[in-house]
Amino acid sequence: MALEDPREAILARLLIVAADVDPTFEARRNETGLPDTSKYVVLFDGDEHAVGDIPGRRSDDEPPPQIVEMTPEVQFRLAAKAKDVGTALNLLRIKLIAAVLMDPALRALTVKRQSIRFAGSNTATERGRSMEGGIGVAFTFAYLLRPGREA
């Protein structure tokens, strides 16, 4: 049986949840140079760091489990009429936050099935023929890393 990486499981599910917020957006992962001819939802894997070992019995056969926090970012990118860009981005943001924080499959992959936090968002707009915009929404997921064991 293959080992499953909890990080990859969370990221794969997060992309599905983000794509479901608005199915008219094309879903991508870790892509930066996208043409501006379509609407995109892009998942960037983000950073992670260990926050501590799990207390308890230790085995000489395997390293202790650790709690790891990772902070991926979901970006929505669109081009629209100038007056509509900000409103559209904010609507996507609030829908995504609700979808991620309430998704039972994502929660099941985290410590105590409740370790997902909204970490913040950042908008970017650009003026051309139309106003193009994007919003990045970051989440922090805490998961249990058990090196060498099945997830």
Image (cartoon, rainbow, N blue to C red):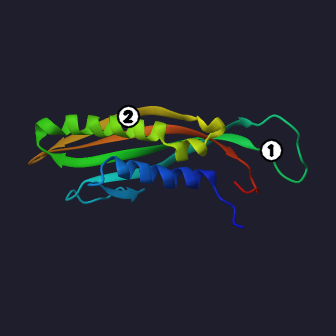
Q: Quadrant of residue 88?
A: top left
Q: Residue at x 81, y 48 (%)?
A: 63
> Which of pointers 1 and 2 lies earlier in the amino acid sequence?
1
Q: Residue at x 61, y 38 (%)?
A: 113
Q: How many marks?
A: 2
How far across and down, in percent of the image, does residue 134 sit? 28, 43
**As shown in the figure, which amino acid type bears the numbered disc 1?**
Pro
How far across and down, in percent of the image, does residue 67 sit? 68, 39
Q: Quadrant of residue 58?
A: top right
User: Dot 2: within a 10 Å radius of its alpha carbon, few (fewer than 14), some, or many (20 or more) residues?
Assistant: some
How far across and down, in percent of the image, does residue 85 sit? 18, 39
Could you say which disc has been placed on residue 110 in the image? none
Q: Residue at x 47, y 37 (%)?
A: 102
Q: Secondary structure at mark 2?
A: strand
Q: Is residue 60 left or right of residue 80?
A: right
Give above or below for 87 relative to 72: above
Q: Quadrant of the C terminus?
A: bottom right
Give the camera-side residue of 133 and 96: 96
Q: Secondary structure at mark 1?
A: loop
Q: Quadrant of the N terminus?
A: bottom right
User: Dot 1: within a 10 Å radius of its alpha carbon, few (fewer than 14), some, or many (20 or more) residues?
Assistant: some
